[in-house]
Image (cartoon, grey):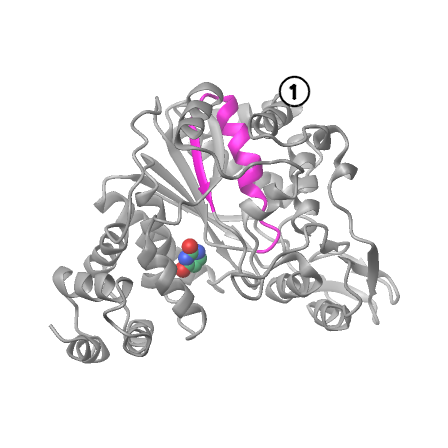
Amino acid sequence: MRMVDLINKKKRGEALSAAEIDYIVQGYTKGEIPDYQMSAFLMAVYFKGMNREETANLTLSMVNSGETVDLSMIEGIKVDKHSSGGVGDKISLVIVPLCACVGIPVAKMSGRGLGHTGGTIDKLESIEGFRTELTKEEFVNNVNKYKMAIVGQSPNLTPADKKIYALRDVTGTVDSIPLIASSIMSKKIASGCDCIVLDVKVGSGAFMKSVDEAVILAKTMVEIGKALGRRTVAVVTDMSQPLGYEVGNANEVKEAIEILKGHGAEDETTVALTIASHMAVLGGAFSDYESAYNHMRKLIESGKAVEKLKELIRIQGGNTDVVDNPNLLPQAEKHIEVKSSTAGYINSVNAEDIGVSAMLLGAGRKTKNDSIDFSAGITMVKKIGDWVDEGDTLCILHTNKSDFQEAERLSKNAFVIKNTKPEPIKYVHCVID
Ligand code: URA
């Protein structure tokens, strides 16, 4: 086989066989296919797409490029969750304790943030002492005993995805449905869970900008899950503005604690309860979604859910005092209020620009090796549908940097203010199963 022939085949829009896809994936992972040929191939996929079978084969080849995790030592139906990436997305911090409370074993492997989107592992590391690396034994024991553990992804899992994702990031080929679907599903399949709940984000802060596109991505991933023997449900949720009010790391942990105490914003509380309830049904704790949802809500009202988060922090070595006193989390020195220069209703917020602003303030990484400032971030003061007067604060920037002017300009321009009140936002668009 020659890579140039396969590039040409995809350029003509023809379907590739399983063997051809595997040749490309394994060849690129081993360094036998150079970046320039892989870039051309990815761009051909971007424009010509892949059919269902090709996307499932691509997923499988990426799974086979590295190790797979054996979770058979964990009792019960292991349910995992994955978000397609957003801004202010602290949902994993909420659903893990909720599912653990109803006995669903959650053996969660999470990622770090890159670019405008955040990552659960960075958020957890803002809690003093919290260990995101556990030995395999600790991981398995914690899930068996406490029904929960959250760790960083093993470096040996899906090496093809790591290499291809990094190339996509710099070649304008991230927002391709077969490439996103295979990237997400390969990680989930390799991490050994039995069932998967996908949170497919749609809107200005997501890779999918329209509900139609998000539904296609959701259906593609559900089909891959089924084809590879994992029960998969996808929930298409709103990302037309940051989720909740906090964007960053320590401030998102603080907000996740508030959600678990019953004081969360309506959008993030609804999304968290929805995802957790689907997980609970897939895991066999409830026979129907409504009973699961009502039960999850009661866990929050009774204080049991937040106690479970405290337990998670304790068993992974973190300072549990942050739950009762979130001010113990890292705090930035500077707090800059971004003011509106006009009056009107907030019609839209460019969530990606808010995410980029938070990154510029120190909350995220431009490149993989950058270090981050846990205390940096943004507090949204106004959200879509709110009225503002001239001079009102739109959002507050938290940083230790003195060169925050670009973030200030970008975050201010992210708000579009008009005289008319926009339609209310739907937090959950649809569920695909
Ligand atoms: N998240 C992933 O893991 N992969 C993608 O391609 C996009 C979002």
Q: Quadrant of the C terminus?
A: top left
Please identify the quarter of the rendering in which residue 314 is found. Answer: top right
The spot of residue 207 in percent (x, y) is 47, 63
Residue 63 spot, x, y in % from top left:
27, 50
Amino acid type shown at disc 1: Ser
* Of 316 and 16, the residue lying toward us: 316
Q: Measured from the top left, where is residue 316 in percent x and y?
A: 56, 30
- Check disc 1: other Cα within 10 Å, few if <14, some if 14-19, many if 20+: few
Q: Which residues are magenta?
A: 87-110
Residue 204, can we see it?
yes
Q: Residue 168, image x and y in percent?
A: 40, 69
Above or below 408: residue 136: above
Is residue 293 something that shows in the picture? Answer: no
Mark 1 residue's CB less than 8 Å from ligand 1: no
Q: Residue at x 35, y 58 (%)?
A: 161
Task: Look at the numbered disc 1 and give the secondary structure of its residue.
Answer: loop
Q: Picture quarter containing residue 44?
A: bottom left
Q: Is residue 167 left or right of residue 210?
A: left
Q: Judge whether residue 112 is colored magenta.
A: no
Q: Residue at 66% of width from left, 22% of height from top?
A: 303
Q: Which residue is identified by label 1?
A: 302
